[in-house]
Image (cartoon, coloured by chain):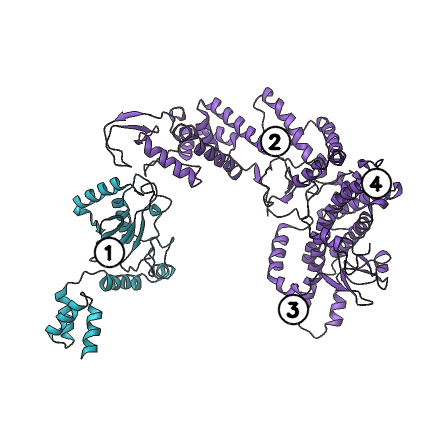
Chain colours: A cyan, B purple
Amino acid sequence: MPYDAARVQKELVEIERDKASGVGIEMKGDNLGHLVGVIKGPESSPYDGGTFKVDIEITPSYPFEPPKMRFITKVWHPNVSSQNGAICLDILKDQWSPALTLKTALLSVQALLSSPEPDDPQDAVVAKQYINEQETFRSTARYWTEAFAKVVNDDDKVTRLVEMGFGEGDVKAALAKCGGDENAALEQLCGGS
Amino acid sequence: MQRLTRSSARQREEETRPSLPSTNQNSSKRRKQSTENTVTATGNDQVSSDKVAKRTPEEPSNPTTAGTKPSASNSSQQPEQVQNQESDVEISEIPESDVSYFGYCSDDGGEVQSNSKVATETSCMDEQARRRQQQEDTEEVAELLGVENSVATLLLRSVAWNKEDLLSRYMEDAEKVCAAAGVANPAAVSLAMLSAQVSDRECSICRLDGPLAFSALSCGHSYCDCCWKRFLSLKVEEGETRIVCPEPSCSLQVPENIVRQLCDRETFEKYSAYVENAFVDESKTCVWCPYPNCGLSVGTTDSSSKFIICAQRHSFCVECRSEAHAPAQCDQVIEWLKKCDDDSETFNWLSANTQDCPKCQSTIEKNGGCNHMTCRKCKHEFCWVCLGLWQSHTDYYSCNRFDPDKVKASEDGKAKSRAALDRYLHYYHRYMNHERSRKLEEQIRDKAVLKMEELQKKEPQRLWGDVQFVGEATEKLCKCRVVLKWTYVFAHALEDSSSQKNLFCFLQEDLERNTERLSELLESEVENLLKAEVKSEVLALAAVATQSRLKLLQGVEEGLVA
């Protein structure tokens, strides 16, 4: 096996046990080499209330090399690329140590959300805004959290689409057909009428 | 010499052959291969080495010994001196008093250099000498502080190998020094590697349960030997020379002997090589030679000049890491090279390799360094650089001078930028030309040796020593060419028609004229060079050209005041 599966397995069990930490890991099928991290937006930050997904790739040399992490959920943050979710964090690069774990790495990413480091930016535009227009930054970050990081349940989608003037039955059928994708369902409803 | 139009196929061939600097290994190898003749050819080097070997003991204040290696003990100094003699052979042509503020070297003494402000030899430290110095420093620190060698290495590396600095700081605040070096305090116990403790607990890296053999540095953060080994191997693979304990909060560095203990031989050898290279990178006493594929380190401490020479005789500037560029200053060189890069497009059409004869318009290709051209067709003699009559270069020489009036007159009404471009091109053209000449002239010695081989087949009584002086004179010629090349960068930075510039142009003119005379003579056929009167003329001209070179450099050093 290319990576240390025994260690990854143990880490997954540990992280599953500790639900209070605010971070978690989901499996993508049976592949231990490719995981999805879940981070709760820290309180009293513009990311509060959001749930952020992180793509985790376990490299063959893990744990001697850091795992590759990238935000799947769009985030407005100076150290995260608003384009591709790349994260600028020292422990995911040269400061990695084999004694660190996926959990500690995810916790560090969570801590990064609370305290951005604009002097070492990943996204120059966001970093500039963070330095020069704190208020605009906070509201943009909050807006992105609302738009991309909120888990929306189906009832809310139905209510919103019905409010637009579509029949409840049609809405439910369209949503089911589009696998719960609200925008695709809306398109279908518009195209169908 | 006449360098005419379509040169023969043979000459072209010679030109396209990669130039082999006379001292590099390839050429000496090549010469060694060609039977006994080579003995005499390399005998050239032999003689000059002998000269130096004799000279060195007469100069007790050999800087390599005096500066970089403050004596550990008398006994350890003994073999060092022998080594120094060996390495001095490599730079045999530079007697101690030859390098001045501008770092130029004279080969033949003379009154000029006696006025130089600073006179020291540029030291060169070969790999062996470097390793020995490293070893000695390490052992001395280890003994004085009562620590193991690998801990001493870590301590020394934290202060850029400045032994005195380390010792005084250690006496002041050992705690601070140890923390900065990633060494446990007291340093003596840093190596308490708790090796091979078999335990049943889980290793925090691989998460396997025991029984496993655990090891730790003196910080006590223990991991199984298997993980240690993989951790160290991967770090070495990455080229890391400062490996710290895997525990994220710990800053203790892994000493060399632990790497040796835990890794296989190949990995450890790689690691040692990296650490040795790191010495040059970290130490302030030596630098890498910037020449491509050279890879030698050169000591800098004993040199008051910023121009130093490596054992392969590459001379370079310690500050800007480009070719030794006297009389030009580093900032002038950087600005100039940038400008050359920017303007290269504009210059492409100007720097074509052919020119037309100013009289009969035949196409002319230059294949030698000499700028005195004689058209084979119409016998017109002219200067390759300014296309003016060659006659004017011997009687009234003005080729090197940029004439602002001339430009004003001809370009009247045109934009100033055009004049600036003309001014730049004037200097660039001459700068490039000297560079090209030097490259061609570097081959003179090799060509003479080849020619001699041919001759000897016909006339076995010929001696190889007969062409030895050609190599020496060529070297002097090339030194003049390098200085001439950089004089145009210096002149470009000088204000036009200032008194300094006038004096500078005068000195430059003198050097250029003498250099061209020497070049012309050296490029004549070997049969001609073998004549006794020609030989003495070559030697005299080489001395005169060198004198001009030193005069120019000293003039600049003194601020160009008449």
In the rendered image, which residue does mark 4 sit on? B458
Q: Quadrant of residue B109?
A: top right
| The N terminus of chain B: image quadrant | bottom right
Q: Position of residue B84 (x, y in %)?
A: 65, 29
Left or right: B147 as drawn, with respect to A85: right
Q: CA distance from mark 1 to mark 3?
A: 59 Å
Q: Three-letter amino acid code at disc 2?
A: Gly
Q: Is residue B92 visible?
A: yes
Q: Nearer the viewer, mark 4 or mark 1?
A: 4
Q: Nearer the viewer, mark 3 or mark 4?
A: 4
Q: Nearer the viewer, mark 2 or mark 1?
A: 1
In the rendered image, which residue does mark 3 sit on? B417
Which numbered disc covers residue A52? 1
Q: Residue furthest right?
A: B533
Q: Position of residue B347 (x, y in %)?
A: 66, 63
Residue at disc 2, secondary structure:
helix
Q: Nearer the viewer, mark 4 or mark 2?
A: 4
Q: Chain of mark 3?
A: B
Q: Position of residue B462 (x, y in %)?
A: 84, 37
Q: CA distance from mark 3 to mark 4?
A: 61 Å
**Residues indicated by labels 1 and 3 sit on the same polypeptide chain:** no
Whether label 1 touches label 3, CB < 8 Å: no
In the rendered image, which residue does mark 2 sit on? B67
Q: Three-letter amino acid code at disc 4?
A: Lys
Q: CA distance from mark 4 to mark 1?
A: 88 Å
